[in-house]
Amino acid sequence: MKRTGIYFEVRENKREAYIQAHENIWPEMREVLNEAGIRNYSIWNLGRKLFAYYETDDEERMQAVLDSSKVYADWRERMEEFVYIEETAGRKEWPMELVFFNQGEEKEVL
């Protein structure tokens, strides 16, 4: 399983619209995420800062599903109105390196 964290920013005065868009995410977009094998997907916010986290078992399959999805392309286009995604060396996201993970103790269930 691969865990991915990505940092990006909300455009000035677009935070509420961005949150509202995700409160009303298209059902078809949820289907694409599920089909792509994306799970435990969450987006965290602090002011204009956004942090997204998700897990997937097959990153290549995930990317193939997303790349072939018109729904995903339309959603990404819509999100460009709300978020500023830093572009450096052709990248549109800032993937982050996992430096610590604690799954917790495994305990016997009685």
Image (spheres, rainbow, N blue to C red):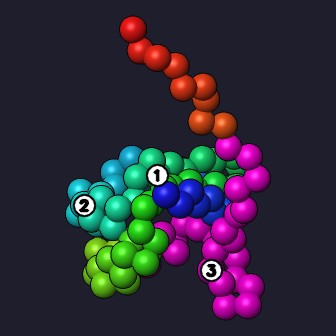
Tags 1 and 2 in contact by the CB under 8 Å rule?
Answer: no
On screen, residue 104 above or below 98: above
Please name which of the two marks, 1 or 3, marks the residue nearer to the observer. 1
User: Residue 1: image x %, image y %?
Assistant: 49, 57
Q: Name the residue under label 2.
A: 31
Q: Is residue 6 left or right of residue 36?
A: right
Q: Name the residue under label 3.
A: 92
Q: Please state which amino acid type lies under the numbered disc 3.
A: Lys
- Disc 1 and disc 3: Cα gap in Å? 19 Å
Say which element carries label 2.
helix
Q: Which residue is drawn at 67% across and 91% down?
A: 90
Say which element carries label 1.
strand
Magenta-tinted stretch: 77-101
On screen, residue 9 above or below 41: below
Q: Residue at x 45, y 47 (%)?
A: 40
Q: Mark 1 points at which residue?
A: 41
Q: Is residue 108 left or right of residue 52?
A: left
